[in-house]
Image (cartoon, grey):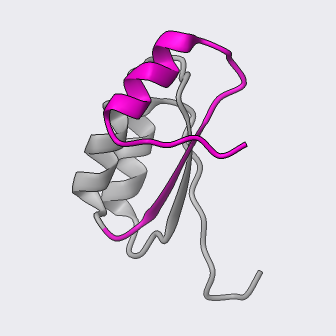
Amino acid sequence: MRAEDAFATATDRASAITALRQAANIDIVLLDLVLPDSNDPRLRWAICRLAPDLVLILMTAYGIPELSTAATSLGAFARR
């Protein structure tokens, strides 16, 4: 990692939104769809509104079909 590179971590929806608001230039977000305070795929839209040019990768270790269906209906697509 270069000196000018930076990263932020968040463990829940609220801290993720706060981190995005405070960060100067985030290029990529790795988002777990199942967070302690949210398993709502609409968090994707909140992130994209705050930083429309970033790359957003949704992931989860949980095989919950409803989450997959909801994320897909919001514009996500699967890579396997």
Is 30 included in the stretch rendered in magenta? no
Quarter of the image that includes the N terminus: bottom right
Q: Is residue 14 above or below residue 39?
A: below
Q: Outermost residue, left direction?
A: 49
Quarter of the image that includes the C terminus: top right
Quadrant in the picture for residue 62: top right
Whether residue 41 is visible to the viewer of this picture, yes or no, is no
Residue lying at 27% horizontally and 43% vertically, measured from the top left: 46
Viewed as shown, does residue 4 lie left or right of 70? right
Residue lying at 48% horizontally and 18% vertically, measured from the top left: 67
Magenta residues, as a range?
Answer: 53-80
Query: Residue 53 at what x, y percent from top left?
Result: 34, 70
Query: Residue 79 at what x, y percent from top left?
Result: 65, 46
Quadrant in the picture for residue 70: top left
Whether residue 57 is visible to the viewer of this picture, yes or no, is yes
Residue closest to the eye, 36 or 64 = 64
Residue lying at 43% horizontally and 39% vertically, measured from the top left: 15
Quadrant in the picture for residue 51: bottom left
Residue closest to the eye, 36 or 27 = 27
Q: Outermost residue, right direction?
A: 1
Viewed as shown, does residue 3 lie left or right of 52? right
Residue lying at 72% horizontally and 24% vertically, measured from the top left: 61
Q: Outermost residue, bottom direction?
A: 3
Is 74 included in the stretch rendered in magenta? yes
